Image: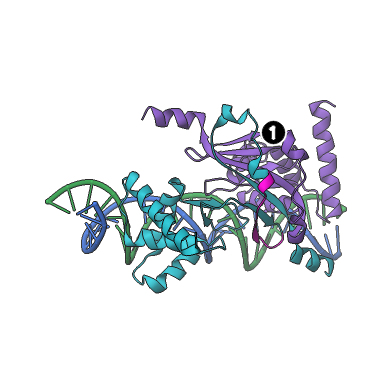
Chain colours: A purple, B cyan, C blue, D green
Amino acid sequence: MTALNDDQLQLQRFEQICKDAGLKVTHQRLEIYREVLAAHDHPSAEALYKRLKKRLPSLSLDTVYRTLGTFDQLNLVHRVETLESQARYEAFNSRHHHFLCKGCGKLVDFTWQYFDAVQLPEHLSNIGTVDQANVVVHGTCAACVSSARSR
Amino acid sequence: MTALNDDQLQLQRFEQICKDAGLKVTHQRLEIYREVLAAHDHPSAEALYKRLKKRLPSLSLDTVYRTLGTFDQLNLVHRVETLESQARYEAFNSRHHHFLCKGCGKLVDFTWQYFDAVQLPEHLSNIGTVDQANVVVHGTCAACVSSARSR
DNA sequence: GTTGATGCAAACGATTTGCAACTGC
DNA sequence: GCAGTTGCAAATCGTTTGCATCAAC
């Protein structure tokens, strides 16, 4: 269960999901997914584009947007809440939650196994079916707290 | 403790917060805040603008944007996560959580008192100070589930 | 070969900004 | 009266779309 094997498993799973959805496994899609998997900083479409451009010089930004949109619908990636105007993405795999700094917009992941095991309220089933429940903590990060104090 | 009194209290609190922050209590700000308080559908800046335009014909859309931005920084309103491109807002008062439908983008509030009483993980204090913790449930609403089934 | 995917360029829409006139304190 | 706020118009920026070409199956 090394990191390498994990990634290979993810990519196999990726191809299967694409085929099941009737989508072609194109070079661009594969690389974009690989890049999202490798990223741990919730990159925007534009950030991914810049990183990928080195490997795929002919890639266009619209393809990144379109592909991320497709992946989001397949639950392969997840569009995350931000305080900026740009949408940000993360791979939809490991269970984690978000801390969002109101001062600088920084987004920090944290894990909370207690919450992950908690049973969701029953009345949710009246609203719809649940894919995933996430906690978003709004606050001020340590850096912003100390800079505000010294202001 | 009628609804009327609640609103009056909210508005008094509002004026106090503005004064404390060195902000003028203008007619526009008062009305925009009142409208957000009255709304229970997470309106966008544009939706608020249309509603307010009836009462304040001279109001401009940029003022609504600017004012909501200001309110957000003061924690008077809260910018909520959506799957649309428009930002949506809600008054920052009653404790609730969000169900977000991946199919139609609908945003439904729900309460979860058990969660509200839960203690947040200790390691959060290493990240920063917490204003509020909210749960975002991603899923598919009942309407979208049945329309997908009949498809 | 067919169908869906990509790249390009142009369009779009939400939000922001500079600036002069105005208004609350 | 002054500093902060508003309204207007123009600019900006992230994202989407139409269409011809191209690649996966």
Q: Is residue D23 left or right of residue B2?
A: right
Question: What percent of the width, then of the height, locates residue A92?
Answer: 73, 43
Give the camera-side residue of B35 and A24: B35
What residue is at 43 percent from the left and 51 percent from the top?
B71
Q: Is residue A72 left or right of residue B76?
A: right
Above-or-below relation of C22 to A151: below
Q: How many marks?
A: 1
Give the camera-side residue of A138 and A39: A138
Report the quarter where the N terminus of chain A lies: top right
Q: Residues within 10 Å of mark 1 (few under 14, many from 20)?
A: some
Q: Is residue A139 left or right of residue B138?
A: left
Q: Is residue D15 left or right of residue A115?
A: left
Residue B107 among magenta residues: yes
Report the quarter where the C terminus of chain A lies: top left
Can I make out residue B45 in this image?
no
- Which kind of residue does numbered mark 1 sit on? Thr
Q: Dot 1 falls on which chain?
A: A
What residue is at 76 percent from the left and 41 percent from the top?
A118
Residue beneath disc 1 = A111
Can I make out residue A48 in this image?
yes
Give the camera-side residue of A133 and B85: A133
Give the camera-side residue of A86 and A19: A86
Question: What percent of the width, then of the height, locates residue B117?
Answer: 64, 41
Segment colored magenta: B103-114
> Mark 1: which secondary structure?
loop
Question: What percent of the width, then of the height, locates residue A20?
Answer: 86, 53
The residue sitting at the front extreme is B1
What residue is at 38 percent from the left and 27 percent from the top?
A150
Question: What percent of the width, then of the height, locates residue A87?
Answer: 59, 48
